[in-house]
Image: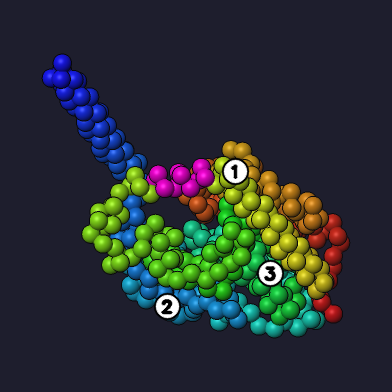
Amino acid sequence: MEEKTGTTKFSKKKKIKFFFITLLFLLIVVIIISEILLYLFHYESSYDKLKGFELKKAKWWQCDSVSGPRYAANEITKADSIFFKSINETWYYNRLKMVNKDGYHDKDEFNNISPDNDSLKILFAGDSFTWGASADVDSSYVDVFERDIKKNYPAVVWNTGIPATGTNHALFATKKYLPLQKSNYVILGFYVGNDFADNLLPFDDLVFYDQAFCFNFYDYDKNFKPFKISKREAIKKATGSYPTEELNPLQKIFVKSRLIPFVSNLTERIANRLSGRKKEVNEQEYNVTKEYLNQLNNYVKENNAELIVMVIPAWDDIKEKEFHYLNAVKILKESSIKYVETVDLYSEQDYLKNGGHWKNRGHVIAGHELSKFLAQYITDKQQKSFKKN
């Protein structure tokens, strides 16, 4: 009887052991298959992102709280030319060759203009789209607009577009350069893809590195209050891992996994949605952006100029206008700010692969439509003089 009981106990232990071994085996198989699938779908591990990751500020970039983010004239090198050519972004190198003394991509110097000057004076503000990302030199939407408008009026067009900035920087640049230019119109290129998010962070510690990627050395807490972050925290935020030299042997193995960051990102998204954090972020982005747009509009009005916003759609908006696009238009309507929509004129082929910036054709479409809008608006107003006495 005792022998039979012992046999039964032994069998239960074997079953439990077999169960856990089987479970472990299946888990290993699932992990391996997942890693293979993520590799085939080109999902990057933290190790992939860290490879060749060098935080050496580009010589062609400057940023501080007084003058803001800007480029540095005459600081590009042959090494820059080789790098940008290797990643098929020669357009970026060519744009870096044209930088005025104020650090903006413009052939004009931003010198003080007399109030008696009767030229049409237009100040552009915005992010990388307005700067001219992915367009050949002289082919950005601002370049196309400038050529068009000069067929109708003597005009002075300044471009203060800077990549990776939001409406807060547009307000900063307008306050700095509208009084110099004596602007008649300020045109803001508002990119719905990331301007809402960019408005949550200050722009005075935005750094571009040699490989043309950038970090904003700010983050925000649960109450959306911005705070400074260190270089190592910026690396962690961008890659999902601290610098390799800080990792122990086990961490160096895990950092090569694609599954770990995939699960971590998925878990974070689900947690944000279930906790309502995503909704809170969207509401904060909306309120802050609306406030900046109203401040910009009021400042422009106070200086006897007019604000026009060109709503720049993201690639996802081409098929159907998405959440941020609809919110941008809603704010502009509620604030009675003039705006131009061109979303129906683009196809997905007018954007770089998988979204991103416009190709040349997208810029050309935007520039022509914007110039037509302003020319017609000036005609309808029967505006004859552009002096700012």
- Residue identifier under label 3: 171
Instruction: Return the residue nearer the eye: 122 or 252.
Output: 252
Task: Out of 380 and 15, give the one closest to the viewer.
Answer: 15
Residue segment shown in magenta: 262-271
- Number of residue marks: 3
Mark 1 Cα within 10 Å, few/some/many (few <14, many 20+)? many
Residue 241: give x, y in percent of width and height. 36, 59
Which residue is disc 1 drawn over?
317
* Residue 73 visible to an observer of this rendering: yes
Quarter of the image where one finds residue 21: top left
Q: Which of marks 3 and 1 is nearer the N terminus?
A: 3
Outermost front residue: 1
Specify the quadrant that holds the C terminus: bottom right
Q: How crowded is mark 2: few (under 14 residues within 10 Å), some or many (20 or more)?
A: some
Write the residue at 36% across / 63% down.
242
Q: What residue type is labelled 3?
A: Leu
**Between marks 3 and 1, how big is the CA–CA gap?**
26 Å
Q: Which amino acid does label 2 sit on?
A: Lys
Q: Mark 2 points at which residue?
A: 59
Vertical order, 76 against 126 (above or below): below
Q: What element carries label 2?
A: loop
Q: Where is residue 172 in the image (x, y as percent from the top left)?
A: 66, 73
Q: Can residue 309 be seen in this snapshot?
A: no
